[in-house]
Every structure is written in structure tokens, then in C-alpha cells.
Amino acid sequence: MNKQLALYALDVAKSLGASYADARLIKTVSETVETRDLFVVYAAENENIGLGIRVMVRGGWGFATARHLTAQGIVFAVTKAVEAAKASSRLLNGRVKLAPEKPHQAVWQSPFNIDPFKISTNDKVSLLLEAEKLMRKTRGVKQTSGLLTFTREKKLFVSTEGSDILQTFLTSGCGIDAQAGVDEHYVRSWPNSFGGQYESAGWEMVKRWDLLGNAQRVAEEAVMVSKARQCPEMVTDVILGASQLALQIHESTGHPTELDRVFGEEENYAGASFLTPDNLNVLQYGSKIVNLTADATVPNALGTFAYDDDGVSGQRVELVKNGLFVGYLTSRETAHELGLPRSGGMMRATGPGFTPLVRMTNVSLEPGDAGTLADLVADTKKGILLDSNYSWSIDDRRHNFQFGTEIGWLIKNGKLSEPVRNPSYWGITTNFWNSCDAICGPSEHVFWGIPTCAKGQPCQAIGTGHGAAPARFKNTKVGVAKPAEDKPKGGAHSKSRSGHHHAKLARHHRHCAGGSK
Amino acid sequence: MITEAKCKKIIDLAIAHAGDRVTDMLVTIFEQDQATSRFANNEMTQNVDTSTITVTITINARGRTSFYSTDNTSTRAIKRAVDKAIEIASALPHDSTTLKVLKPCNLTEDVTPKFSRYDPRIAALGPDERLARVKSVVGVARRGRFSAAGIFATYLNTYAIGNSAGLFRFDQQTNVECSITMLSASSSGWQKGFGCSLDAVDPVALAEGAASRARKSRNPVYVRPGEYTVILEPSAVLDLVCFLYDDFTGTEHWYETSSFLKKIGKSVLGDNITITDDANHPLQTGFLFDDEGMNRKTVTIVKDGVLKTPVKSRRSVKYLGGSPTGHGAAPSAAEGEFPMNIVVSGGESSLEEMIASTKRGILLTRVWYVRDVDPNTKLLTGMTRDGTFLVENGKVTRGIKNLRFNQSVIEMLKNVVEIGQPALAAGEETFPAVVPPMKIEGFKFSSRTKA
């Protein structure tokens, strides 16, 4: 990493009239192995390096990327950024101001035990093919797939305020899935749907999630779901499995607490938020047991970092405390606009080609006292356990949501009684969170990683983390989405049932539609 | 902007460096210069000008296929990328299904694009010109006492493909995009334009269209969820129909995962529905060759409701028969193929005529966050957004609060009663395509929301 080039970018920016500038010099290497039906369909490595330069001139923002890391390339990019900022400054309601942050000098590495880039490609391929073979032993399984992906990102952040921060992020992801069915196909996946689990960790996470040890169960559940009856339409108590709850948190807590969204900056694409400032410290967002935080300091979670792309240190911020809405996800700009003394440190960009936005860190539901999942099921007289996301949708103000999961288990008298297929549930955000009456304890709490959260124009996909333990929600509408009676005979599902499609979208960034947004 | 000569040089270098260490190889180069002026609350919030390039080396080393991509176009980096790809391939199991690269002699059609999708005026647009357009949008907003949010963006895309059999393809095109939301205290309206020519997008006209929708939908009322006659503007049609794209691919038929499996030659949609993939359509955008270097052929996928054929890659025709249609996506084993230039045929009705013939219904500007609920039936859920209106006795009477739908897109396309003139529509769930507005009976709304 050539720090001198990054510092040179700041000097050029200042000489061209910038009152503030920051530069991010980022080098990324990644490796992906993907198998499907016992074939390696994608074995690839990628490397890229670039410098993103953000400048403020007369209170307006400009941003450009330097692809050619030479003095000439830097001058070219900085000049473009300054010209853009000057244009911005001619259409402002008021000059942008930033909440204060002292400059930081730091070197940070995300923790890991085993470097996945030192594990041979052969070993990675062998693991996935072995998992596929195990899944295919189950009668009725029609298709199988597996995915391993690893990324190392080295990021230098320097600013005209004197920050000089070098961070290295190591991210690992793993997942398998099996599909079954005769005229229709159904999927079960592990550890999570749409490509698997993602963590800020090394190869040890692949070992911990034990793809081989779970392959047979996943296959058996895929066959079981394919033979199950349609989830009935009813109002009942819902227990959300931890990975499904993670996406519920992402969509109905994380996004509406993004303060740039609240201020209308995402109106045209991702939408706005019902959590307007008049609700702060007033709105009973959830029940008394609901505590939601944004914590960038959690080890090994996907939204973990030491410093954000404003140069602000990662923090733990309360969003909902004892059910009361108490905080936002902020940047230096939005924190100042709200009158806060300091940013919460949530400003991030996807690589050097994008300008930073307010982003979730690890937005999590704090564990409760309901014990294990088994304890919670035993405590539920009638209800349904829903696990592993399949479908997700929420309105542009984050009120009205509908989720579907890969599997549902009807609960009768404290026991899982019968699996059902195509389960879905629907609700209004605040009603739903206020109906939460039990949250499992720390032993069930997992930080799930969502690798493709989409936001911004041009659209950026970034990783976020979400800690969750299974939780129960009273009187929830279930089975609202029912397939038509006259299903096309011989029909089957599209590949979007599996993680395969997700990997495809993530690989090509054709559009942001495949991710959450 | 990278030149054709530079692309050829990179590709030749990579192929020469690999030599006889590989059976054959493919090199693709994609460069994009993108500039976006973003605004909200009637002020500029972001202004970015970026450039990215990706060189992807695909090698087949005796039945072992691997990929390495880099954004470094130096001689050293390209040679390293080739070496790394060969190293990865050496660790892979043999795959007897691996295809050889396309030979130039297999190109039976003229390889020269029939027309240009490059507008030098777009390529020359700078931040001041973007600002002028954003100011014109904000001017419309201020005059109507609205708050405007959106983007004005330009793109310059370059795509080059070369392989070890001597094939070389190169093309450049420009795009312009403008998306506008107008907000009042109780309502919103949206319009989006996209095209290859600067003339294709008129920011003021889009702003006025969005403002008109925001004005007409002020103080929206609740309506009871249920089945309604709906009139969908083209963007809404696009963001629903695009969920069938995967089902229109040969690979999904080969894998037996298409919703239209074993339905070729049978009626699957209404007899007033014809869907083609036509890269040469004058309203379309995109490159005229696929990721294997093959010309994109015009394919009639659905004709008068009858499924004729999926689009096919060289890989899927090995299992399905027939000929490849020039829709291969890279990497072929993982991606199969994709219809990139969908055209849904139009009818004679104007939007006004659809409204006039509706006793009670709902007019939708835009749908949002659409997702599969049951891919077996293509049951989709999503929300309405930014301009949802009640139609009563042939007139748009007032705005309504947004609704959630749970609707099979296959069933929807069996219930189309009127179709308008197709236009290049841009949505949020997919890339732009040529689709008409439609009037549909029995569209299912399941719940409502506060906004």
C-alpha cells in the first residue's frame, strides 16, 4: 500500500480548494469455489486495487476513483472529485457540516485463527463435493450445491484532519443446500439460505459450521419439506429461528434507523423511514424485553470494524432500549444535522469505487432469558417455528413486511408436531416487535452475516451482521401467501430457490435486486 | 476510456502467455465510466465520477476450467492472472462437459453491430451539465412546492471478448439514466428514464410526470385489500415480468427447474401475450454479442401465449438440442444463459383508454421490493409505491395508501385484458426492457400499510 499516493491525493485536493478530503486506498483479493450437482461450476480468484477520494468544496461533496495509481492518475481523479464538489456546492440548502471527530492513527486486523488463503483449492473443492455426495445419498434429493468464498481487504484511510488508519479485513463464507420434490422443488440450506453464513473470520468458521456433519440432515429436511402440506393460514404464536430473526432485524430495525434514510436522502431508491426524529425517545417500538443495538466492536461479525469511512471509531450504540426507540445509525454529517455531539461511526462504502453511506454495523437483538430453543418450544402451547429465510419484502417506509422461510414446524403442546411448506408471516413493524414475549438466552445467540445489503445510487452491496437468538411473537398472521390452487403440473422452482442464484447475483452485480435493500 | 487496440493487445498478451499450457482460453474486458449526480430535499447530496475495469481470464486446461480477474492491465499483472488461473485449474477435478471456445467461423452473421448505441454527447457530459439538469428538476419541484429526490447519471461501457480460437469482439455504448421522486407532505410520485441517447431522457418531462402523480395522490385514503382490476404502468409491468426471466432459459429447462418445464409448444400465458428477446430492437440497450462472443439472435420465447423456446447457450443445447441463441452468460457452467433484451409486445390501448374502460380499479406507477414467495407458481409479493390511485367510473379519482400484493405473475399474464404501446421501461428489480402498460383483472392485494 503506497501511503504516499494517498497523502498526495489529499495535498492535491487541498491545493484545488477542498476544505476537507479523505482518501481510501483499498486492495482486495478474493477466492470463490462453487459446486453444483457434483461439478465445479466456478473456481475463481479476483484482485483489485484503487483509491477513492472524497472532497468537500464550499460545503458540497464530490467523489472520484483513481484506477491508475500514479501521480498523474491521482491528479486526474482528484480534479474530477473537486469539479463534482464545486457543482454540488451550487445546489445546496446549506453547507454540509460534520460532527467533530479527533484524528486517529491506528493499525487494525480483524481476528482469525486459520488463513483460508493458505488452504488449498483442492481441499476446498473436496469439502464441497464430499458434502454434496453426502446430501445425494438421501433418496428424493434432486439437486445439491455448495459455496465457499473468502475475501481479504486491506484499507488505508487518510484525511486532511490527520487520520491515518490501516485496517485489514478477512471475511469467510460457506454454505450448502439440497433441493427435493417431484413436480415441485423445495430447498433446505445450511448454515443459512442464499449462499450460507458469512463472518469476519478465517477457515475456522468453515470447520465450526461443519458442512459434512449437517449434509445428511439438510438433505432429509429438503425431502421432508417437499412432502409436507402447505402452511395453513392462521393467527398464532410464531417462533423465529435465529437466522430468520436476523433478517427481520435487518429489514425492520436496521434500515429504518439509518439517519440518512430518515432525512430523505434515499427517498428515490431504498425509501425513507417511519422512525422520524419526533419518535426518538417517545415511540414504544417493541415490548419491554426488546433491546436492539448496533455494535461494530463485536469480534468476528460481518459488520465489525475498528474505524468507519468517516474516520470514526467503531462503537456500540443503543437503538431500542426496553422497547423504547432511543437511537439512530449515523454519520458525521447526519449526526451534526440531528444535533448529536458525535457520529456513531456507521459510514461505509463498498470498496474504492463508491462514496460512503450510513450503513448497519452489527444490528442485533440482545439475548433474553427464555433459555434454549427447546425450552421456548416447550413453553409454547400452540404456534409455529419458522426457520431459514426464503422470501423477504418490506415497504419503503418499513411498516408492512412479509417474510417466507424454507421450513415451518407446527407446535402443539410444547412439541414440534408437523413440518409445513411455503410458510410465510406478515406484520406491521411496531405491532410485531411489541408482540415479542420471549427471547432465548446467550447460548442460542449467533451473529449472522448478510453479505449483500443493497443501498444507494449507484447501488452498493455491503456486508452487515445481526446477532439474534430465537424469539417468540404473539398472535402473528401466518400463511398469508398461498400458492394458487391450479399449480402448473410439472412445474418447478426457479434457481432463485437456492443459494446458487444469490451467488450469481453477487458475482456479477447485474443489479442490486438479489440482495436485501 | 480503453481503446479497441488496447483491448486486443491485452487479450493477445494473455493468450500468448498461456501458450500450450491451456487447451483454450477466453479473455473478457469490461470497463465502465460512471458519473452520478444525486439529489434529495431539493439539494445535491452526492456527486460521483468513477471508472472501473475488470479483465477476466477463463482457462480450460484439459477439462479443468478456472477464472482469474483483475483490474490491473499492466503486462506483469495480465501474465500473473494467466499463471494464477492455470494454478487454480490444476487443483480441480476433470470435467468432461467442458466446452471448447467459440471459433470465429461459427459466427454465421455479420459481426459488425447494425447500429451504434454510443452517443458522444453523453460521454462528454460533465458535472456542470449534470447540475444543470438536476437544477431543472428541482425547479419543477419548487414551483409545485414539492421536495425532489433522485439521480441523473451517465455511463460509458466498453466490452471486449477474445479467445484462443481467434475470435475478437469489441463494442462501446453510452447510457443515460434519470430517476425522480417528487414528495409532498402526504404523497409521492415517481418517474424514471433510461436510454442510449441523450435525447432518450428528458429530465423536465420526467419531473413533471412525477410531480403530477404526487399532486394527484395527495391525502390518500385506505382501500380494502382484495382482488382488483389494476392498470400497471410499464415500470410496474417490468418489475413483475422479470421474475420469469430465469424460467425462459435453457439451463433451467435442462435442470428441470423452470416453471414452464415440459410446456414448450403449450399455452402458458394469455393468448394476447408475446414475449421476444431482441437485442436489435431500436428501443433496446446493451451489447449485441453474448459472453461467449456470439451474436445475440432474436428469439420468440412466447408467441400468443404459447411457449415456443427458451434462450439457449452453447452449453445447454448439448442437453436440450437445437442451436445456441447467443445468450450465453459467463461463466457458462454456473450461469447458463439469460434473456438480456426482453420485448413484450404491445396492443392498441392507451393508458387513458384503459382508465376510461375501468369501472373500479387501481392504477399503479411503481412496485417495490418484489420477491418470490412460491417459485413453483411464480407467486410474488411486493408493495405499491410512489403513485397509487383509485380508478372509479373511468376516471382517476384519488390517491390511495400503498398495498401489499401476493400475486402469481403467470396468473397475472393470463388475465391481461388490455395492452398499450411498449416503451423502454426502467424499474428497480432488473435492467431496463421494452414493455407495455397493461390492464389486468383479479390482481390480488393482501394487506395495506400506513404510508
Image: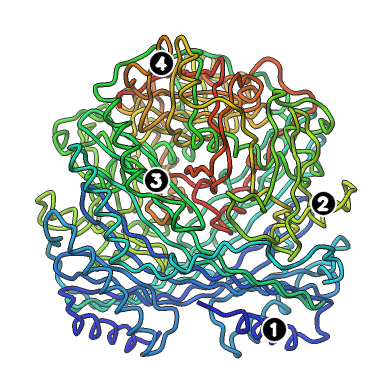
Tag in front: 3 or 2: 2
Which residue in the protein does label 1 denote? Answer: B14
Q: Is residue A318 visible?
A: no
Labels 3 & 2 near each other (Cβ < 8 A)? no
Residue located beneath label 3 in the image? A467
Pointer 4: what residue?
B391
The tag earlier along the polypeptide, 2 or 4, is 2
Query: Which of labels 2 and 4 is toward the front?
Result: 4
Q: Which class describes the residues within 10 Å of circle 1: few (<14), some (14-19), or many (20+)?
A: many
Give above or below for B20 relative to B437.
below
In three-dimensional space, the C-alpha distance between marks 2 and 1, rounded to whole angstroms, equals 28 Å
- Same chain under badges 2 and 1? The reply is yes
Q: Same chain for labels 3 and 4? Say yes or no.
A: no
Q: Quadrant of residue A228?
A: top right
Q: Is residue B115 left or right of residue A49?
A: right
Label of residue B316 in the image: 2
Q: Nearer the viewer, residue B274 or A96?
A: B274
> What residue is drawn where x is 11% and y is 56%?
A94
Find residue A513 and report its horizontal and vertical position in percent.
51, 46
Q: Chain of mark 4?
A: B
Q: Amino acid at mark 2?
A: Ser
Task: Tell me where residue B386 appears, x and y as whole percent.
Answer: 35, 33
